[in-house]
Image: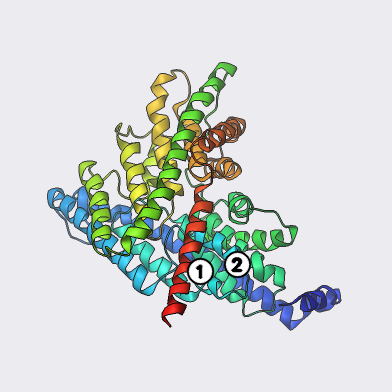
Amino acid sequence: MDDRVDQEIAERPWHVALFSWESWTRRGLFIVAAIATGAAALFFNLADRLSVTFRGFLLKGEVLAGLQVDPNWGAWIAVGLSVFGMWLAMTLRDRYFQGTQGTGIPQVMASLDVDADDPLRGHMLSWRIAVGKALLLMIGIYAGATIGREGPSVHVGACLIYLMGGWGHFPSWAVQRGLILAGGAAGIAAAFNAPVAGTVFAIEEIGRSFDKKNVGLIMLAVAVACTACWVYLGDYVFYGKLNPSLTSPAQWLVIVPIAAVAGFLGGCFSRGVVASTVWVNRTLRQHRVAIPVLLGLGLGGLGFFSDGASYGSGYEQALAILRSETEMPWFYPLVKAGGNFISLISGIPGGLFDPSFSVGASMGQLAAPIFPGVDARAISMIAMTAYFTGVVRSPITSVVILLEMTTARDMAMPLFMTAVIAYEASKLICKTSIYEALADIFLEDLRARNSEQKTAG
């Protein structure tokens, strides 16, 4: 849409803008797309919950649909599912769903870097990609991949709102950025029931800039998508209502070492993922079967030797830690981070929010005995914020999302201090944020593939 049409929309009388059929069609399409985004996030949520039951069936001898499996056999079945699932997801992705690879957030960021009329955008935002993202995420979840749901929720949300917006007469600024940002924000918000964090993340990380024109679209999409989830789940708090706090000035000193160490480790993880993704992408062209099988064996091996601790998003473990209901083994953060590392470099759809929070929570639990007298839940929240900030380099989002997911108001200032220290510690080892680096890799590979296809044609 050119500037002349934008000007015509802006100059319409208020009653035309408010009551015209065109305006109501535009609003209706946007709301339907936002509801669909919330429904997609809800579907991913329920699928993730059911996968926990499925793993209990395989690994703990729990009854499922009247069936029961010996855990000794179930552990081997889980390894086989990891290998087969990794091969299947990577093969389907490369043959039928190119553009669905990765968490989804880098792909949405990359789509903002090209013009609305650039054919490349169609390779990042399409109905085929939305369907493929959902399908491949399901395969990954039940194969035991260590992945979260938020990245695919962002990508699917951006596809839905952007594509349905194409049926209405939106101004050019909305088509270029606003609809995509709104979809991404709605996906994050609905995935965690965190509307403020979804809005902040869209501005801080996905958009990487602030434009007042887009704020209204983002907030409306977030509100509608979250409401769509509330209809089924209710207005829940992701990790439950917590009230930890640091009760004396001396206790605030624990922030410095935990934030510095966890933030630095998060930066190391981020740098490792980026470097290894480049290697996997390059090597996969010559070894279409060997690479997926090796990655699947690595994923299954971690699950086998950790008694299933590495499988899944890690939400259940983080929740139990924050509620002081369990003591995770010392190796848990290693195997969970290892599983997330393998899953991310494979390029199968899946996010890193949940696994990162789980790794951080377990780091805090390990550190708690070093600081007697300090609430262990507060230490876990500090470590969660620090590690997540180190990985994604989005400090404002890190603080806001933890506060929304726990309602721990007394932890606001400690978490702000944590995020600042962790951010600086991460920068020592990782100069570019993981999402920006992966977006650049994805866009470069996409352009190279398109150029090869044009040459071959």
The residue positioned 24% from the left and 41% from the top of the image is: 306
Q: How is the image coloured?
A: rainbow
Q: Is residue 207 left or right of residue 386?
A: right
Who is closer to the viewer here, 329 or 177?
A: 177
Residue 397 shows in this picture? yes
Q: Is residue 196 left or right of residue 307?
A: right
Q: Position of residue 360 (x, y in %)?
A: 43, 37
Q: CA distance from mark 2 to mark 1?
A: 10 Å
**Number of the front mark, 2 or 1:** 2
Q: Is residue 123 left or right of residue 341?
A: right
The residue positioned 60% from the left and 34% from the top of the image is: 416
Residue 232 shows in this picture? no
The quadrant of the image that shows the C terminus is bottom left
Is 451 drawn above or below residue 354 in the view shown?
A: below
Q: Which of the two labelled residues, at mark 2 and mark 1, occupies the earlier sequence position?
A: 2
Residue under label 1, please give it.
124
The residue positioned 50% from the left and 29% from the top of the image is: 260
Question: Toward which corner of the image does residue 176 lie, by quadrant?
Answer: bottom right
Numbered circle sitting on residue 114: 2
| Tag 2 and tag 1, C-beta contact below 8 Å | yes
- Callout 1 crowding tier (Cα within 10 Å): few <14, some 14–19, many ≥20: many
SS type, badge 1: loop
Q: Position of residue 63 (x, y in %)?
A: 21, 55
SS type, badge 2: loop
Q: Position of residue 106 (x, y in %)?
A: 51, 58
Give the amino acid type for the residue marked by disc 2 in the picture: Val
The quadrant of the image that shows the N terminus is bottom right
Give the amino acid type for the residue marked by disc 1 in the picture: Met
Who is closer to the viewer here, 285 or 59?
A: 285
